[in-house]
Image (cartoon, grey):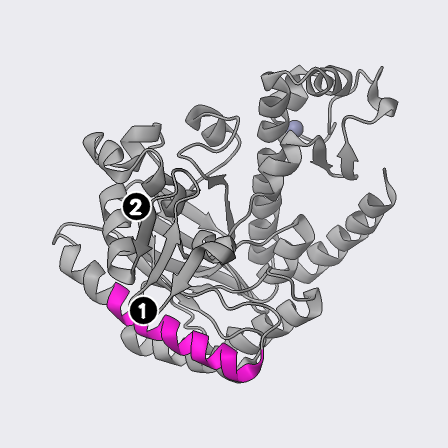
Amino acid sequence: MKFELLHTDGAARRGRIAFPRGVVETPAFMPVGTYGTVKAVDPGQLLASGSQIILGNTFHLMLRPGVEVIRAHGGLHEFMGWHGPLLTDSGGFQVWSLKSLRKLDEEGVEFRSPVDGDLVRLTPESSITVQHHLDADVVMVLDECTAYPIAEDDARTSMELSMRWAARSRERFDALKGVDSAAALFGIVQGGIYPSLRHASMAGLGEIGFDGYAVGGLAVGESESERLAVLEALEPAMPRERPRYLMGVGTPQDLIRAVARGMDIFDCVIPTRHARNGQLFTHNGKINIRNGRYRNDTSPVDPACSCSTCRGYSRAYIRHLQHCNEILGSTLATVHNLHYYHTLMAEMRDAIEKGRFDEFASRQAEHGKGADRRP
Ligand SMILES: [Zn+2]
């Protein structure tokens, strides 16, 4: 993996990550492929929507179908038919979401599989091993996602545990990595909403040394101003020459504000989940396609959009499909929302290159206000 920083505009960055499987122009958005599929769309539709890299969920795939099945195909790319770059998470966030099902100690985390009730243990070493077998282009360290709200002392204890796990993850990754492997390993900055802990986390990870740095433990219930304050405090401490990944964020406005604070790549279920629920993003704001006002609407979802959904189908047709629970209704909506997100990222890249990112962001904020007033 090779990262190049091409332009900056304030803290906003325009970069390029080259993998043997393809190039990712940043800022970039990664659709989430939970069970070895980005729900409702196939790899051809992902590519056509502008997807450059997608995310796979280690936790779900290790439980179903199990890593051996995927290994038998030669890895997750071959299993799911996606041949571009692929990032896998560590599984830690999903375990953390189970709450009542987990037992956490120095060694790792133990939980009952929500699939069959079996006792499963996840350690930094086993997470890295599974991701190695999935043949991910970007592997994530196992960390503990710090809860919110949390006292500073507890946030420190949690961050320090994540740091020891990061070192163990690095060790296992290096032991497994073949000489010709181009896989990258990213560390994850923790520390809750406390700037001094975030700085300590970044410094510790930097000492271990990673190919990229993610910001974890956000979008877990904190206010937007708390989240942005963390990013603002952290940004100057993050190495310029490494990609920065803000995990689990967010809405179009969230992405713009995070790019303004120096973040490069993002993942979130919002565009795909919203699509299946009838929430479609347009240049005039978000619309609920199931609303009665679209019953006879022969216009496309977004007249300013060039995706295959907007070129081929009307609002009334997509509304009809979703009301009848037709599978195609989810597919067409997902294609459009992903295209909207990827177009937004491309517009941000362009604005950064032209030195007009602030202007772009304030124009988009005006659109955002309009969207909120719409049904
Ligand atoms: Zn469209």
What is the secondary structure assignment of the residue under circle 1?
A: helix
Nearer the observer, 319 or 307: 319
Q: Which residues are magenta?
A: 151-169
Q: Which mark is residue 257?
A: none
Q: Is mark 1 within 8 Å of ligand 1?
A: no
Taking 86 as reference, is 334 above or below it?
above
Taking 146 as reference, is 306 above or below it?
above
Instruction: Answer with the quarter of the image where residue 359 lies.
Output: bottom right
Residue pictured at 59% horizontal, 30% vertical: 334
Residue 313, percent from left and from top = 68, 16
Residue pictured at 77% horizontal, 32% vertical: 288
Of tags 1 and 2, which is closer to the observer? 1
Residue 372 in the figure: left or right of residue 149:
right
Instruction: Answer with the quarter of the image where residue 374 lies.
Output: top right
Number of other residues with Cα within 10 Å of mark 2, as a class: few under 14, some 14 to 19, many 20 or more: many
- Residue for badge 2: 136
Instruction: Answer with the quarter of the image where residue 326 lies.
Output: top right
Residue pictured at 29% horizontal, 60% vertical: 123
In what quadrant does ligand 1 lie?
A: top right
Of helix, strand and loop, which mostly describes the magenta segment? helix
In the rendered image, the quadrant that contains the C terminus is top right
Confirm whether the magenta stretch covers residue 157.
Answer: yes
What is the secondary structure assignment of the residue under circle 2?
A: loop
Task: Give the spatial CA distance, label 1 vs label 2.
Answer: 19 Å
Residue 29, percent from left and from top = 52, 47
Residue pictured at 59% horizontal, 34% vertical: 339
Q: Is mark 2 within 8 Å of ligand 1?
A: no
Q: Which mark is residue 165?
A: 1
